Image (spheres, helix red, strand yellow):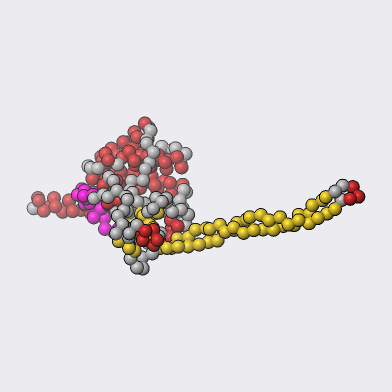
Amino acid sequence: MANKVYDYVTERIIEQLETGTIPWSKPWQGGDPINYVSRKPYRGVNRFLLPKGGEYMTFNQAKKLGGKVKKGKSNMIVFWKLVPYKKSKKVTEVKGSGNKEENKDKEEKSVMTYPILRYYNVWHIDDIEGIETKLEKIENDPIESAEEIASAYDEVKVVNERGNAFYSPNKDFINVPDINKFPKVEEYYSTLFHEMIHSTGHKTRLNRFKPNESTIFGSKTYSKEELVAELGASMLCGVAGIEDETIDNSASYIEGWLKQLKNDNTLIISASSKAQKACDYITKNIKEKESETGKEEVA
């Protein structure tokens, strides 16, 4: 039964790619850190300094809005401030003509600037009392069939500590945004399944990663691994019966990685084979339970 689902999902993905897909969109909200007041995202190194996505504000911004910050919860961000200064230089003027020429030194001043690295503290809105988020509030109910798949695969720890979704091969854990950060609950499971598929590539499981290359963003190996992960996620969504809600965005995501590989659609088939193995690895505990249940019923 599972193999039929895998093949069906792969065929649908290929059909979507052939007919054209809509641009991929990040399926969760609050993934990037932004300033609560300006609504502008923090850029550069500040994205790495802030521990999670969502809204931040300074002490003065919180105070002005009637909020109260909690002690010991601030995060440092940095910025460059341009400081003006005056620069003088001597210029020689030549006056008169012929034997009556006269050189006269004149001092000219110009305003220049130099950068100074500054820093200040900001607080996440979760650590501020009395101020409500401007982000849409979402309350999602878990999907039982998807939860069964996720809970059966207990080899890798899943946390919700940062605003983005990723799998860490070095520390062997998965991070996904909280389920209530997703306008469509099905996309939460698609994202979780994507990272779960990645985790099966660990050397202690299916050993899919090449040394020193699996984490290089944009490399050929990385691009192929993304195909495996997204195809596997779509297959698991098919097993859970929620692929209709996620397959458009998945096809668009896959199309983006195929462009990195010069639009070689034949890679879908090889990636599909690896994705099926990963799905079987994740669902093996479910199959074992079903097998044991069947034996009990016969007995």
**Over which residues does the magenta segment extend?**
140-158
The quarter holding residue 86 reads bottom right
Residue 188 percent coordinates (x, y):
29, 49
Residue 24 percent coordinates (x, y):
38, 41
Q: Is residue 143 magenta?
A: yes
Instruction: Name the residue at the left extreme.
Output: 299
Foreground pick, 258 / 22: 22
The quarter holding residue 204 reads bottom left
Quick one: quadrant of the N terminus?
A: top left
Residue 113 in sight from this viewpoint: yes
* Apparent side of residue 87 relative to residue 243 in the rendered image (left or right): right
In the image, residue 92 sits, relative to residue 71, either above or below, namely above
The quarter holding residue 154 reads bottom left
Foreground pick, 132 / 289: 132
Q: Is residue 94 magenta?
A: no
Residue 14 percent coordinates (x, y):
35, 36
